[in-house]
Image (cartoon, rainbow, N blue to C red):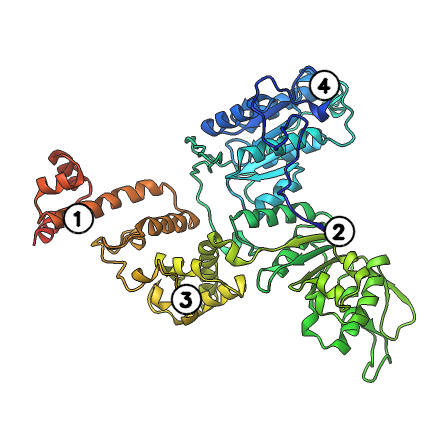
Amino acid sequence: MTEYSDKHKPKSDTQTANDQIPTDQAIKVTVNNAPDDSPATLWLIDDDAALRMVLADTFEDAGLTVISFTQAQAAWGRLNDILQETESVTQLPDVILTDIRMPMMDGLSFSDWVHQHFPKLPIVIMTAHSDLTSAINSYQTGAFEYLPKPFDLDDAVATIYKAINYQPNLVIESKATKSDTSKTKVTADPTTNINTKSDTKSKPINQANTVSKVSKVNKVTKPKTAVKVDTSANDNPSGIIGQSQAMQTVFRAIGRLAHSPITVLITGESGTGKELVASALHQHSPRHQQPFIALNMAAIPHDLIESELFGHAKGAFTGATTTRPGRFEQADGGTLFLDEIGDMPFSTQTRLLRVLANGEFYRVGGQQPVKVNVRIIAATHQNLEELVKQGKFREDLFYRLNVIRLPLPPLRTRREDIPALATYFMKRAADQMDTAPKQLHPMAVQIMQSFEWRGNVRQLENVCLWLTVMATGDTVMAEDLPPELLENIPSDLEPHLEQDLYSAGVDSQNPIQQSQISSNTTSWQQALAVWATQSLQTGETDILQTATPEFERVLLTAALNHSGGKKIAAANLLGWGRNTLTRKLQQLDITASEMQRNSD
């Protein structure tokens, strides 16, 4: 059994015994650890100056020679010079690390062009837009690996080491032998000749050149972007949503496995999205124009499963008046998804084993073999190893199916994905009901995040549909949630459940009002964090400029209320001077009538 996992850290000869990345400046990393006086060269491409500097320092400390570029266009120009033999092939890097969204030329188009002209040159793609589409498009353009931000710097170094030390069919004698393709004179403009499948990769998108800080735990934060992200269903046709590390592993697996005909076994609890993952594997594979047939073994009577899978010949049994093709024939050339494979009858397992072995089967009652070319993706929520021990599942079939195992995480282990999932399902439910989507109050979101969700994503989707139909008003409050969500509320949320979260005294049209809470609430930081997350997910930008004046307005209103409208006293409470308070009153457009109300 091979279970997909990206937790393994490749270890190079320069690592210490406890797998820590050495920081000795004298250390040199060479290609495939070949004896060479010249350290391996990394080309680093990112338009964020601060992040580029942090990464360059990190990789130099790890023993690499780093050449930085502010945009992919510049790196492409140097590679194109090598293709035209105006520059020596010794200038080729050993690995390239590039961002996706950059001005003039995006990283995916660059990666695709490099893969066409320098197929042995590994490229690692990093991006703050860590969704399924980005992962799949990265691998489809020939990327060696995909790094979603934020990532651990040690993980990034380990990935670059792995790319340098694993270059198949590449004989390392000198840098001059690295690329045979450089002898062909080609002048290609990747911004016009590359046809890739992403909606965003050929569109140049600017990133703000802001400082990305590295925290004490050695994490690279996502660079601030000036791009509005549309989270509508149209931009997420797969319906697979998640920014958590567990989902990034799933995205990587789909990206790597999509173009392979290999059999995949998807495991996970009911409702985790196994059919969505199977569909994504098919839709991004070379078979995507062929049928995708899904069949649930648990939903078919046992005496009909063989006929359903393999079809039947005319006269095979009473009522079989015509020859009927089965699901295998319908899926010929495409993908057959066998859901709940653990519920397949033991007798049918034997026939399935033959199909997996040679792609051949007989219809029920048929005399002639039928040959098909079908990719099998199976799924189960059961422990197949235990079923094998109990004699309920064939061991040889288990090993045939269990080529690559892809485990899906339950929703309770990725609670950070719940706000985005809930927003998506609320919008989809509103589209089904032909109504405006309802907004979730921050307290309602917190309660949803604390729930166990034994039914996983499917249960969350049903709750969002229930709220769209049953909740009154445009905003779903905590008390509007279904009873099962309110039964076991964590103790730290109980004191706030009955509070009026809209009593901050701010204009009802204010875009930040959902995060304003009364002064006796101890979790205003959490509410602010929820508001910020939801705002970014709905495509808002410059949220600091939106939040700061409203934050000041709330504090100024509270100080004026507390001081009875006396400006000097309010200024002292806020730690401001009188002139600052007067200027803020003008900037925030707090009128005399409002001040009078504050003093009453």
Say which element carries label 3. Answer: loop
Say which element carries label 4. Answer: helix
For label 3, the crowd category at 10 Å Cα-Cα, with few meaning under 14, some 14 to 19 and many 20 or more, is few
Above or below residue 299? Residue 87 is above
Label 3 – label 4 distance at C-alpha? 64 Å
Which mark is first along the chain, 2 or 3? 2
Identify the disc placed on residue 262.
Answer: 2
Looking at the rendered structure, the kind of residue marked 4 is: Lys
Looking at the rendered structure, the kind of residue marked 2 is: Ile
Label 2 – label 4 distance at C-alpha? 36 Å
Label 3 – label 2 distance at C-alpha? 44 Å
Q: In this view, does 177 lie to the left or right of 563?
A: right
Q: Name the residue under label 4.
A: 175
Which mark is first along the chain, 4 or 3? 4
Q: Mark 1 points at which residue?
A: 557
Label 3 – label 1 distance at C-alpha? 36 Å
For label 1, the crowd category at 10 Å Cα-Cα, with few meaning under 14, some 14 to 19 and many 20 or more, is many
Looking at the rendering, which quadrant does residue 136 occupy? top right
- Residue drawn at the location 30% of the way across and 60% of the way down: 496
Looking at the rendered structure, the kind of residue marked 1 is: Thr
Query: Which of the two marks, 3 or 4, is nearer to us in this view?
Result: 3
Nearest the viewer among 534 and 319 is: 534
Q: Is residue 426 visible?
A: yes
Is mark 3 in CB contact (under 8 Å) with mark 4?
Answer: no
Label 1 – label 2 distance at C-alpha? 63 Å
Is mark 4 in CB contact (under 8 Å) with mark 1?
Answer: no
Looking at the rendered structure, the kind of residue marked 3 is: Asn
